Image (cartoon, grey):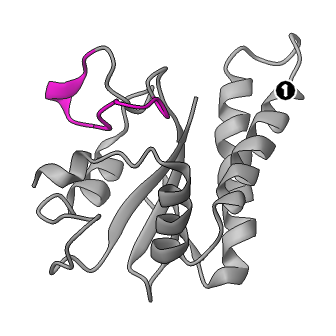
Amino acid sequence: MQPLYLTIDDPQHAQNRIKEVFGFDSKVLLGVIEDGFAARNETTNNHPKIYGGYRHFAEGTAFLRERLLPKGYSKYTQGNSEWVHNEKKGILISFMAGNASVGMKGQTPSNTDGLKAEKVARNRNPKGSMFSRIANAQLHGDMLTLHSGIDTWCWVLMYY
């Protein structure tokens, strides 16, 4: 269904939908992103080159969990794919880096191989088969407008 590629770019609409779908204020997610960047910025030229990016991901995942566990979410790990899970709401959330189109108005969010074009908002690095298996389970429904038979929706808090 095409609405899977819908981008909500009106700030008030986005805030309302985050509250409605996830049960918390959008400031929670902004705090996770800001704290992840702060952790990355604490690395130095003496750290291994890849450490800043890995630390950003690892600390961002921890910050996401720390903020959402008190709100009814739990840690969820399958394979090496890290998430927070709210079983009651049927939500999984992961944290990862995106490309330069993430967060830009008019972009099409996608993880589809056929849409790996310029100006397509997507993750920066290919994800493994476990992430794909978890995320692709939902692709036969419309997570924004319809209630379907899917019992868990996967979301990604993506930063650039």
Q: Position of residue 14 (x, y in %)?
A: 50, 56
The residue nearer to you, when weighing 125 against 38, is 38
Give the residue at x 51% y 73%.
22
Q: Position of residue 16 (x, y in %)?
A: 52, 67
Q: How many marks?
A: 1
**Residue 139, relative to residue 58: is it above or below?**
below
Residue 147: quadrant of the picture: bottom left
The residue nearer to you, when weighing 18 against 11, is 11
Give the residue at x 20% y 35%.
112
Q: Position of residue 101 (x, y in %)?
A: 43, 24
Q: Position of residue 135 (x, y in %)?
A: 30, 56
Q: Residues in magenta?
A: 102-117
Q: Quadrant of the C terminus?
A: top right
Residue 79 can be seen, yes or no: no
The residue nearer to you, when weighing 9 against 143, is 9
The residue nearer to you, when weighing 51 against 121, is 121
Q: Quadrant of the N terminus?
A: bottom left
Give the residue at x 43% y 83%.
89
Magenta stretch, main secondary structure class: loop
Name the residue type under label 1: Asn
User: Can you identify the residue that label 1 sits on?
Assistant: 41
Is residue 114 within the magenta segment? yes
Residue 97: quadrant of the picture: top right
With 42 as the anchor, is 141 left or right in this view?
left
Is residue 106 within the magenta segment? yes
Q: Local crowd at mark 1 within 10 Å, few (<14), some, or many (≥20)?
A: few
Disc 1 secondary structure class: helix
